[in-house]
Amino acid sequence: MEILDERIITKAIVENFSKDFLDYTDCDVAIAGAGPSGAVAAYYLAKSGIKVIIYERKLSPGGGMWGGGMMFPYIVVQTEGKGILDEFDISYNEYQPGYYVASSIEATSTILSKCTKAGAKIFNTISIEDVVIRENDEIEGFVLSWSATGIAKLHVDPLVIKSKIVVDATGHDCEVCKIVCRKIGNKLNTSTGTVIGEKPMWADVAEKHVEDNTKEIYPNLFVTGMAANAVYGAPRMGPIFGGMLLSGKRVAELIIEKLK
């Protein structure tokens, strides 16, 4: 076995990360959150030739889907969302008519793998601290910081990337939308102009609304997945993920149309 030089290992990691990070300081679409909706959106965007990056604040991309229902590693997808499981080649069984059960581990890992192989880039342990807005009041990018910086409460200035479109896929917290409200006022495309907040669990209603709530909520800011329901005041849905997957595909379609 050849002698390994730790300096070469270090250089390989730093040079490759730096190259990718600098390359994505300008991109077409920047997504906050690598949960199922964000990853599915990135997959379809990348397949369409769009330069897309996801920033995930946690060490492990994938959002809450890893845990299935209460850490039982299985998820349910209804008939409408089954086509995405088929497209991603995720195995499942039909528990009852209209209820399809898949391994949360296989589903999450497969979606992330397909997403990156399609050409999307994922950077983990990076948080969205702010958005970039210019005179036209349109969002033009994200302000980034290491997640560990925030956890340690260190006063460290962030860095900035520019993007034509940004997506809030941060789940229940809808963090980007809250930043926009806090920084520029209540100007979101909701009945109140604010983040209304999610209602209690009602899977049937939540699943029916999540695609409809997937839209451009502020100039150049789109919302998808559970963040979409939370912003518009719809219920949460729990460990059924068909709507989340369809929402990711829907936001990609809307963005592709806008970028044309």
Image: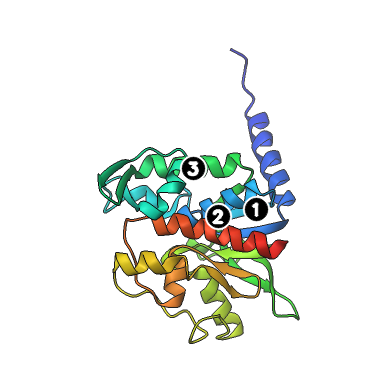
Asked if labels 1 and 3 touch by Cβ distance under 8 angstroms, the answer is no
List the residue tagged with mark 1. 52
List the residue tagged with mark 2. 41
In the image as oriented, which residue stretches furthest toward the left? 96
- Provide residue 253's location: percent of width, then percent of height: 59, 59
Q: Earlier in the sequence, mark 2 or mark 1?
A: 2
Nearer the observer, 46 or 207: 207
Mark 1 crowd level (few <14, some 14–19, many ≥20, 10 Å Cα): many
Disc 3 from disc 1: Cα separation: 20 Å
Label 3 or label 2, whichever lies nearer to me, is 3
Disc 2 from disc 1: Cα separation: 9 Å
User: What residue lies at 66% left-to-right and 49% top-to-bottom?
Assistant: 48
Disc 3 from disc 2: Cα separation: 14 Å
Amino acid type of the residue tagged 2 in the rendering: Ala
Q: As displayed, is residue 17 above or below residue 232? A: above
In the image as oriented, which residue stretches furthest toward the front? 97
Nearer the observer, 260 or 236: 260
- Provide residue 162's location: percent of width, then percent of height: 72, 63
Please state, as top left, top right, bottom left or bottom right, where the N terminus lies in the image: top right
Badge 1 marks a residue whose secondary structure is strand
How many callouts does the rendering have?
A: 3
Figure quadrant of residue 199: bottom left
Badge 2 marks a residue whose secondary structure is helix
- Provide residue 33's location: percent of width, then percent of height: 52, 58
Q: Earlier in the sequence, mark 3 or mark 2?
A: 2
Label 2 or label 1, whichever lies nearer to me, is 2
Amino acid type of the residue tagged 1 in the rendering: Val
Asked if labels 1 and 2 touch by Cβ distance under 8 angstroms, the answer is yes
- Residue 195 in view (yes/no): yes
Amino acid type of the residue tagged 3 in the rendering: Glu
User: What residue lies at 69% left-to-right and 35% top-to-bottom?
Assistant: 11
List the residue tagged with mark 3. 87
